Amino acid sequence: MQKTKFVFITGGVLSSLGKGLAAASLGALLKARGLTVTIQKLDPYMNVDPGTMNPTQHGEVYVTDDGAETDLDLGHYERFIDEPMSQRNNYTSGSIYYSVIQKERRGDYLGGTVQVIPHITDEIKSAILSIAERPDAPDVALIEIGGTVGDIESLPFLEAIRQMRGDLGRDRCLYMHLTLVPYLRVAGEHKTKPTQHSVKELRSLGIQPDIILCRCEVPVSNELKRKIALFCDVDPDAVFSSVDVGNIYEVPLKLFEEGLDQKVAILLHLPAKNANLTPWRTLVQVAANPEHSVKIGIVGKYVELKEAYKSLYEALNHAGIANRSSVELNFINSEEVTTKTVDSILEGLDGILVPGGFGTRGVEGKILTVKYARENNVPFFGICLGMQCAVIEYSRNVANIAKATSEEFAPLADDKVIYLMTDWFDHRAGCKVYRDTESDKGGTMRLGAYPCNLESGSFSEKAYGCELIEERHRHRYEFNNQYRQRLEEAGLKFTGLSPDGELVEIIEIPEHPWFVGCQFHPEFKSTPMRPHPLFRDFIKAALENSKG
């Protein structure tokens, strides 16, 4: 634990400035310098985890290999530093308070009065230090504090990280503050007052930032940086611009040009190594100079908030870069897809993707979308609920199971081709696990990485180039094996199964140009440097379709 050094990242003025992206980009730069890096997100909301939160409010729930349901920023972390995240990388106020209350109920505090300080703050510090107490402890841990300075929910986290400098020493702790520097086009100048007030608020809590990162539309001048440094009491060379970019993967390069990683290395006394950014430069160059273009329709139920499908969006972009193609994404509300509108809405798409989701809203539109893709030979990719909709559509319209449905939509129906499985073999536990169907909703799904055997010669096996894979899951409902033989006889192929053959993971239609549905979420394992093979081949098939 002694070797790990910490960078605490806070934000001010307003939310959605891009703390997660800044943390991920700094992590990428430090890793490019040969350091080992991890990133942790501390969220101030009271939910124990984001698992039960509506995607239209919070964005997607990002799932890790160990089955943690986490904040979408962990997706940024994995994509930028190419290191797996886990439950240790995301804590919420809810999880912290829940842990403290459990300890109090057990009597761990020996009858003492439980208070925010020291009990809640100690629990937060324990969570932070947990990522440095492993045998493979990283050289640097970046800790992002969610929300903005001044939020009442964030106060215990800010107090905890304030104490960390006293606990660990100045050479192991660094505070970086991301703040808005608005550019008034009418006046033709930046305004620093929001930054000054944000830093004043932070300092009133006992935290003096070492570095200020200015979120801005256009770069902040050196003169303005000196002004910010003067009024915020930081080194003149510790103020950096974080400008708008056309491609988020340019951010590490922009911050490198500013010298951010060099300043962090100096303040934390890190080894003076040159960063190898050749892979990032190549990536950005290829993305900026596509040779082709492809139009993909994403037919989902949370399209009003693009953050709800953040990993999908990024995985498709990664696949586009791998195929040297730009990817135009058309987000389509599945509730608007009806028998009367389906042709006009979906016409002209080169590929169609139906993502996951929960509940009955918009499902019939997704099923109609699958039917359109199947009958019109449009490359199709169904993920989680999208795969289940594909099974229902094929059952109804090809296998003549007219009332085929899912137990999620019609619990009392006769032909539930998708149903709630109450037990399955968990390879991590090495035994069967059982679902309590009467329990709370949180944590009752099949979550995290599970193995899958692929059928030789299938679309999926050709994409992966191997016959055994491991992918991340997040769902409650499974394919009902009572209908497997009937659907196979009708032409649907089950090309991905769990090692014991009980869980259907992938379905395909071999006669189709490219038709794949998977029960898992492959988007969670796609990075710009390693595009996911299924997305790569889906975009490849869509390109071939666009060329006729």
Image (tube, grey):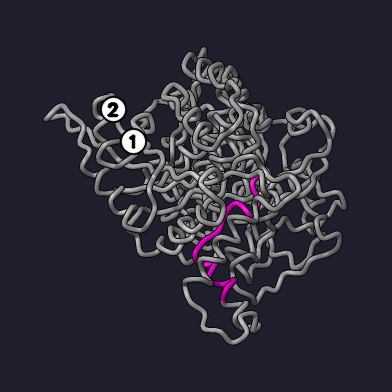
**Amino acid type for the residue under numbered disc 1:** Cys
Which secondary structure type mostly characterizes the magenta part of the structure?
helix
Q: Is residue 504 left or right of residue 548?
A: right
Q: Is residue 455 visible?
A: yes
Closer-to-camera residue (24/486): 24
Vertical order, 460 against 545 (above or below): below
Residue at the bottom extreme of this rendering: 111
**In the drawing, what numbered circle is on residue 220?**
2
Question: Residue drawn 36% across and 53% down?
Answer: 148
Residue of label 1: 214
Q: Is residue 91 magenta?
A: yes
Where residue 419 sits in the image (x, y, percent)? 69, 62
**Quarter in which the C terminus is drawn:** top right
Magenta highlight range: 84-100
Dot 2, how many residues are within 10 Å of its Cα: few (below 14), some (14-19), or many (20+)? many
Q: Is residue 313 magenta?
A: no
Question: Residue drawn 29% across and 42% down?
Answer: 232
